[in-house]
Amino acid sequence: MKRLTTYYFLLLAGSNLLLAQYLPSAITLFEDVISKGPLGGMQLPFVTERVFGCPWWPWVGVAICVFGAMLSLLGIPKDNVLKNLLVIFLIIEFWALFTTMAAFHMPFIILNPT
């Protein structure tokens, strides 16, 4: 494992694995809080419903990162190509993380009864 991109892909795979383990239980807990909390079971925003319907997306990130690490170990593409793919994946990952975070906070901002 001489290539630095291998370590980056493995680090991202581990991070996505932790998120994949945490996200379904966080969604379940959050749905309980919304149904029993101050919002009283109001209709959720569209983005929140979409994120709650897709708790599997971190597993896609794990698969992509493991695939990228294997490509890096095999040395099939050049290191510059893998770095570009890593940057593209990071941009998509940051967008997905921001959307998830915003979806968790949106009901309390938009539907706040006070």
Image (cartoon, helix red, strand yellow):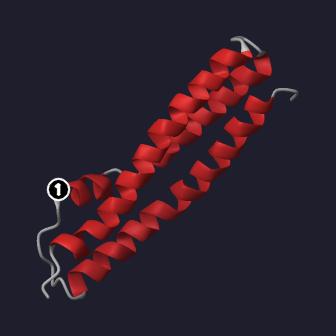
8 vs 48, left or right, is right
Q: Measured along the vertical axis of the image, is residue 70 above or below residue 97? A: above
Provide the secondary structure element on which disc 1 rests.
helix
Is residue 62 visible from the viewing direction of this image?
Answer: yes
Residue at figure coordinates x 57%, y 31% from the top left: 87
Between residue 17 and residue 96, name the one nearer to us. 96
| Drawn side of residue 69 relative to residue 41, left or right | right
How many numbered discs? 1
Of the pair 33 and 86, the residue shown nearer to us: 86
| Residue 55 appears in the rendering | no
Vertical position of residue 37 compared to residue 64: above or below:
below
Q: Amino acid at mark 1?
A: Phe
Figure quadrant of the N terminus: top right
Tell me what residue is drawn at x 30 percent, y 79 percent. Answer: 32
Relative image position of residue 78 (x, y in whole percent): 72, 12
In the figure, 104 relative to 77: above or below?
Answer: below
Residue 40 point in image, percent of width and height:
15, 84
| Residue that badge 1 annotates | 46
- In the picture, which quadrant includes the C terminus? bottom left
Q: Quadrant of residue 45?
A: bottom left
Residue under the image location 49 percent in, 47 percent down:
58
Relative horizontal placement of residue 34, taking residue 97 as reference (left or right): left
Residue at 41 percent across and 45 percent down: it is 95
Task: Give the image location of residue 98, x and y in percent.
Answer: 40, 53
Furthest-right residue in this view: 2
Residue 102 location in percent, x, y?
Answer: 33, 61
